[in-house]
Amino acid sequence: MHLSELPSELFTVIAGHLPLHKRVSTLLSLALASHFFYNIIIPHILYTHVRLGDDEDQALPFWKKFIDAVHSKEEGHTTTPISYYIRHLCIRYRATYESLPELQRLIDCDGLPNLVSLTINCRDISLDLLASIRWQNHCPSFQGIRLSSLSQIPVKWIQSELFAIQAVSLSFDLSRLFRHLHTLELGVMDEYDHRIDARGILSSIMPNLRVLILDRFDVGDPSMTKGFWKNHPHIFRLELGRKVDGLWFNDFESGMLPDLRVFKSDFLLARNLLSHVSESLVSLYLLKTYNAQAPYLLRTVLRSGTLSALKSLGIHRHSDDIPTTYEGKGWREDENGTVTEAPFVDPNHIRRFDGNYIMSLAKAAPNLEELELVGDSDDTIDSITSALCRFPKLSRLTLSGPIHYQPFFQSFRKWREFRDWYRPISLQQSYAPASFEQAASDFARGCPTLENFTVGDEISGKLLINDG
């Protein structure tokens, strides 16, 4: 079948898989190929995703153009305004100061009737302005909002707009914004590393909420969490970042989140939730685990010791010998399932990623297709790949170091990709491939099911299997 014979609606789906940085150039090139492609792509697909960047001087003319086109339509012009085609809108940094009032004007004149999601990445934002917009009347398809890099500076803005200065907390009810919200993502940027009280979130009711992603929030009143989870049973993706604290699952009961398929949190939060949702999870990412806490959690804390439905697993692991009694830190099991617990202060029992560690993961998640390990290893390639072969369906593997620009195997420091960041050192390691190509080849030979192999220098956290 020729590409031009495909139904036109499929081109929108195809374009959705283009990388964002290549989307515009690729679509424009295709539009020049023929009148057929031009009529499909411009403006229908080209303006589906619109991103307004840092330059306010460039952003404002776009808003004026959009608003003027809507008014012209109202005056009888037949040309469809470009803003009618926008489904996903992103506004970031300095472009938000003047852009948000213009956004409100455009929405009030029904200029974004097909808007599905809004992403705002900035330091200063008026949530009262967002709350005042009549979303359901003007944007009936609206489902998701992402607010990130919110700042607690300056203090005057904190007092008047978002936070109560006496107790850092959200001072608004999210239910006022979007009762029909599908996706909510909130992240706070704060140089003092404060946490924001999640009271404003926990007191909200968003009956259609399916995706909740939070970072730098704290539970001030644990008694509010049980009611929140009961009021939002349709959540299928829940991500609580590395800076989320508190008793989020206080008095949690099995059956509260029956649709949960994707979960991301640190060890302590996962410790309280997993036993209630383990049978439904398809994707799991564990942050801030120490030594052997991840296999301990999956093999000992869970009643069954296995997550048969799990297809995707990510683990961020610290290795240390500090005398802190972290639960499960020195846990280990052998091939027969016999468990031992190493002394907490014994420096010889630092648990890195090795064959034994991965063997326990394979026992816990035998149907895994995707694995990301963030930490370091001093084991041999044969031991690592032999353990990976215990996953009969494993096709994607990502290995990243515990700190920025620290490789998974220390010998990787000699690679061109890493050597600019470290002085030459003498490494006594049994596995020292000369390049990424050699490492990829070694892992492919050792684990034949692998189709994708990635070596990173920081937490990726972007597991592909994230929709259940």
Image (tube, rainbow, N blue to C red):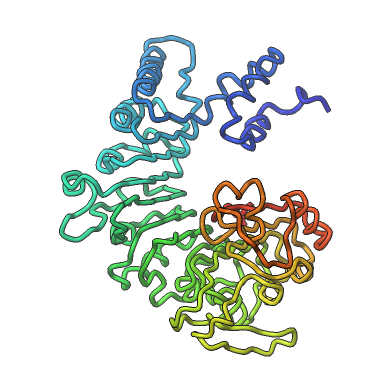
Q: Residue at x 82, y 63 (%)?
A: 446
Q: Residue at x 39, y 46 (%)?
A: 148
Q: Is residue 219 left or right of residue 180?
A: left
Hey, which quadrant is residue 224 in on the image? Answer: bottom left
Q: Is residue 258 left or right of residue 304?
A: left
Front position in the image: 175 or 461? 461
- Provide residue 1's location: percent of width, then percent of height: 83, 28
- Position of residue 215 relative to residue 98, above or below, is below
- Position of residue 199 relative to residue 144, above or below, is below
- Provide residue 433's location: percent of width, then percent of height: 74, 56
Q: Residue at x 74, y 53 (%)?
A: 434
Q: Is residue 3 left or right of residue 221?
A: right
Q: How many numbered marks does the figure carry?
A: 0
Asked whether residue 317 appears in the rendered view, the answer is: yes
Asked whether residue 312 appears in the rendered view, the answer is: no
- Position of residue 298 relative to residue 62, above or below, is below
- Provide residue 342's location: percent of width, then percent of height: 57, 87
Q: Residue at x 63, y 16 (%)?
A: 39
Locate the C terminus by quadrant: bottom right
Hey, which quadrant is residue 137 in on the image? Answer: top left
- Provide residue 442's location: percent of width, then percent of height: 80, 58
